[in-house]
Image (cartoon, rainbow, N blue to C red):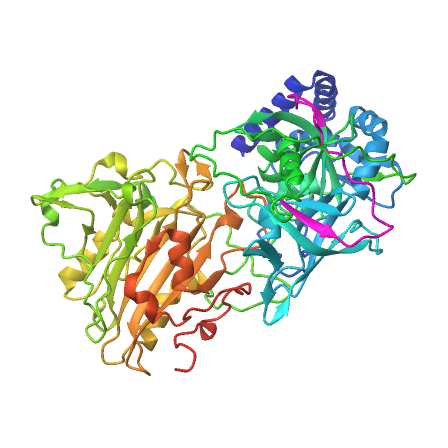
């Protein structure tokens, strides 16, 4: 709790230093609370446990389990009240000018927002919630706003949920035979049943990975559309006063759930306004300190004085940092609509350090908007602190598809003490007896060689061993190929003998003396949350077969850091964890042998945490001789932790496992499976439809069509 207090005090200190006028008000608020003590409104622990209301039943949104009652320590509450004064989150409703701040009243923000009423009114009316039909999980996916009378801008990661590139154009995805449709509702306000929804009729552009996180969508013409928000052409100044307008969604990943409720109240998924300041420009991105959550993806960052958009919000860390695509870059991409058959030219990929500045706008920003309508706007800030009671049960491994709500993520866990114990075997020659992965392990099928590295082939770690140059780290029943710059494996390949598996005891982690220690991630990003756990590529139990001694050696070998990648603490669960076991059940009953290839997708724009680039997603290929056909078959799978990496503010997905074609994995991972691809049960199918997440093992296809 002391750490939370220090964190809040640091945030408040920064706000006070950057905004002296507001700083004086915050200091006065803090002094008043100190004098009032426990008698101050909202001060002190809650009077008994209070149940948290369930989240709205929306597809893809997690309904949290009920956690044990916990009251915040008294010294935290004054800081949260002061923070709500400095960085409030206001409701928008009924288009009427009314500011309600309750116990966190700020005369400074009241005055500033009243002064900016006309600018805010126009921007609020031009901002909407992007809603979907025929999506397998989500009813809505983010925020968008009018940048032109008939064009909405949002984030790439929002548009990718319902759109994709097909050749030189973009199309709506399909799911279960139905083409998805999308609307943008310019209302969706708290306690307001009306709708102002307009159909999104065309996907004009989705920026490629490596470019800015933006997309443009065409709206159906309507007389009810507001005037677009003008893109600013002025140079952004640190400490510019701004407001973010969007639809924050409850984020189950935030450890301080009571703090989140204290700031955002119990109103989520509805239009909110959060004032704050620009904190700087870094690596070509605009940074600001407005209070945001997932669902704010695609929000406008509005300059209060001019009413112009300074940026397009796309990511953030709760109460720490927020990021937006600068308006100049949005204008540059928008100006390209109409070239190359109406599509912007692809952006050159950013360098790996992401240090390049965005290109300057080559044409003037869109023409100024006409004066706003006579509608006005109303805000209020909720101050009700919610406490979770009870505790969720995460013991079951059952996985089911839910059409209205998705299962909650497990809460934070402590890392295993053994995770911090790193051993190093003294001599490379101790590994002389490790045979490694066997390509001919599946005797009745053709050999399955290790995948060939095609992209980043120059980054493969080579080392001298037993007088030869090697690139394959051979262990007991599995092998690993390492990436030099990333210090992670390209992949781990294992042979599994299900009939001769043995139970073993988990040892500690260790480094591999055959390659330099500086090519192995040892401790930098690993530890208790918010750090990451070491995620096995080859599971610990998979090479543990054969004689007891050999099984123990296989288990111990799996604990090399070369076989681990950074994963969120709650990553391994559900279908992904059980794929190997399910395949063993379908392998030849008299043999029960399978081969498994597993690795991370390594991309230049992977997020950096604790000095390490963290893979966003992972792939797995399982090959075996099918018990029914007697023939070798292969199936591919992917899983992503992109939606739950803390800085990414898109919370609607969780750890969904998808079945994918081997060609899809080859293209995305930059590797080749050689002849194994011809054994893919997915065949040469073009995965044009959105692959729905697997909800049960029975949905997995292990036979090709017609087999």
In this view of the protein, which residue sits in the foreground, 361 or 475?
361
Instruction: Please state, as top left, top right, bottom left or bottom right, where the N terminus lies in the image.
Output: top right
Quadrant of the image occupied by residue 451: bottom left
Query: Is residue 606 shown in magenta?
Result: no
- Please state if 489 lies on the left or on the right of 386 as rendered: left
In this view of the protein, which residue sits in the foreground, 149 or 548?
149
Which stretch did the figure color magenta? 215-241
User: What residue is shown at x 40% (from left), y 55% (from top)?
Assistant: 667
Look at the picture and state if 116 lies above or below 590.
above
User: What residue is shown at x 58% (from left), y 26% (from top)?
Assistant: 281
- Please state if 696 lies on the left or on the right of 624 as rendered: right
Q: Is residue 165 in sight in this rendering?
A: yes
Look at the picture and state if 410 lies above or below 595.
above
User: What residue is shown at x 85% (from left), y 29% (from top)?
Assistant: 114
Q: Position of residue 171 (x, y in %)?
A: 61, 58
Look at the picture and state if 620 lies above or below 218.
below
In this view of the protein, which residue sits in the foreground, 210 or 269?
210
Q: Is residue 650 in sight in this rendering?
A: no
Look at the picture and state if 671 lies above or below 466.
below
Q: Position of residue 485 (x, y in %)?
A: 32, 37
Query: Is residue 231 shown in magenta?
Result: yes
Q: Main secondary structure of the magenta part?
A: loop
């Amino acid at each position: 709790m002391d750490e939370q207090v220090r964190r809040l005090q640091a945030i408040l200190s920064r706000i006070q230093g950057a905004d002296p006028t507001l700083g004086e008000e915050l200091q006065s608020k803090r002094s008043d609370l100190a004098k009032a003590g426990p008698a101050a409104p909202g001060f002190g622990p809650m009077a008994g446990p209070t149940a948290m209301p369930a989240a709205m039943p929306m597809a893809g949104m997690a309904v949290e389990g009920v956690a044990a009652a916990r009251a915040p320590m008294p010294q935290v509450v004054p800081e949260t009240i002061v923070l709500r004064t400095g960085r409030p989150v206001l409701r928008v409703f009924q288009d009427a000018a009314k500011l309600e701040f309750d116990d966190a009243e700020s005369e400074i923000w009241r005055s500033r927002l009243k002064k900016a009423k006309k600018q805010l009114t126009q921007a609020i009316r031009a901002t909407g919630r992007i809603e979907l039909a025929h999506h397998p999980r989500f009813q809505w996916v983010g925020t968008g706003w009018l940048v032109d009378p008939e064009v909405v801008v949002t984030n790439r990661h929002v548009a990718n949920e319902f759109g994709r590139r097909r050749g030189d154009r973009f199309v709506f995805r399909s799911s279960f035979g139905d083409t998805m449709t999308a609307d943008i509702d310019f209302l969706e306000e708290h306690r307001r049943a009306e709708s102002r929804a307009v159909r999104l009729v065309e996907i004009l552009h989705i920026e490629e990975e490596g470019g800015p996180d933006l997309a443009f969508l065409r709206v159906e013409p309507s007389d009810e559309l507001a005037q677009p928000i003008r893109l600013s052409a002025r140079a952004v100044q640190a400490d510019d006063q701004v407001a973010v307008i969007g639809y924050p969604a409850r984020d189950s990943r935030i450890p301080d759930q009571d703090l989140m409720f204290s700031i955002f109240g119990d109103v989520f998924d509805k239009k909110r306004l959060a004032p704050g300041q620009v904190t700087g420009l870094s690596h070509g991105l605009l940074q600001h300190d407005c209070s945001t959550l997932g669902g704010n993806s695609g929000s406008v960052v509005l300059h209060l004085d001019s009413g112009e958009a300074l940026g397009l919000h796309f990511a953030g860390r709760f109460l720490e940092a927020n990021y937006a695509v600068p308006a100049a870059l949005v204008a540059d991409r928008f100006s390209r609509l109409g070239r190359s058959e109406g599509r912007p030219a692809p952006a050159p990929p950013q360098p790996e350090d992401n240090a390049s500045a965005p290109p300057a706008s080559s044409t003037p920003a869109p023409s100024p908007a006409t004066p706003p309508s006579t509608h006005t706007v109303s805000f209020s800030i909720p101050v009700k602190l919610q406490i979770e009671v009870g505790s969720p049960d995460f013991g079951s491994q059952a996985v089911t598809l839910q059409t209205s709500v998705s299962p909650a993520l497990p809460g934070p866990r402590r890392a295993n003490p053994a995770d911090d114990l790193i051993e190093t075997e003294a001599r490379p020659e101790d590994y002389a007896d490790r045979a490694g992965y066997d390509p001919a392990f599946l005797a009745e099928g053709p050999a399955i060689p290790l995948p060939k590295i095609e992209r980043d082939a120059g980054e493969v770690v080579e080392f001298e061993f037993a007088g030869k140059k090697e690139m394959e780290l051979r262990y007991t029943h599995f092998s690993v190929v390492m990436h030099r710059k990333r210090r992670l494996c390209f992949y781990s390949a294992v042979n599994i003998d299900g009939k001769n598996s043995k139970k073993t005891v988990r040892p500690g982690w260790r480094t591999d003396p055959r390659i330099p220690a500086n090519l192995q991630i040892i401790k930098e990003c690993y530890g208790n949350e918010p750090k990451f756990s070491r995620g096995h590529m080859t599971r610990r139990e998979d090479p543990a077969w054969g004689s007891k001694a050999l099984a123990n050696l296989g288990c111990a070998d799996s604990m090399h850091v070369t076989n681990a990648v950074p994963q969120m603490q709650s990553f391994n669960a559900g279908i992904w964890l059980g794929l190997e076991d399910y395949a063993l059940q379908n392998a030849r009953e008299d043999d029960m042998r399978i081969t498994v290839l597993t690795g991370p997708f390594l991309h230049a724009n992977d997020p950096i945490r604790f000095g390490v680039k963290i893979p966003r997603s992972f792939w797995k290929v399982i090959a075996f001789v099918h018990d029914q056909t007697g023939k070798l078959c292969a199936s591919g799978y992917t899983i992503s932790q992109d939606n739950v990496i803390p800085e990414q503010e898109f919370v609607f997905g969780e750890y969904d496992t998808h079945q994918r074609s081997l060609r899809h994995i080859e293209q995305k991972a930059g590797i080749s499976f050689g002849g194994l691809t011809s054994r893919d049960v997915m065949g040469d199918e073009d995965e044009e439809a959105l692959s729905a997440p697997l909800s049960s093992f029975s949905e997995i296809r292990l036979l090709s069509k017609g087999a």
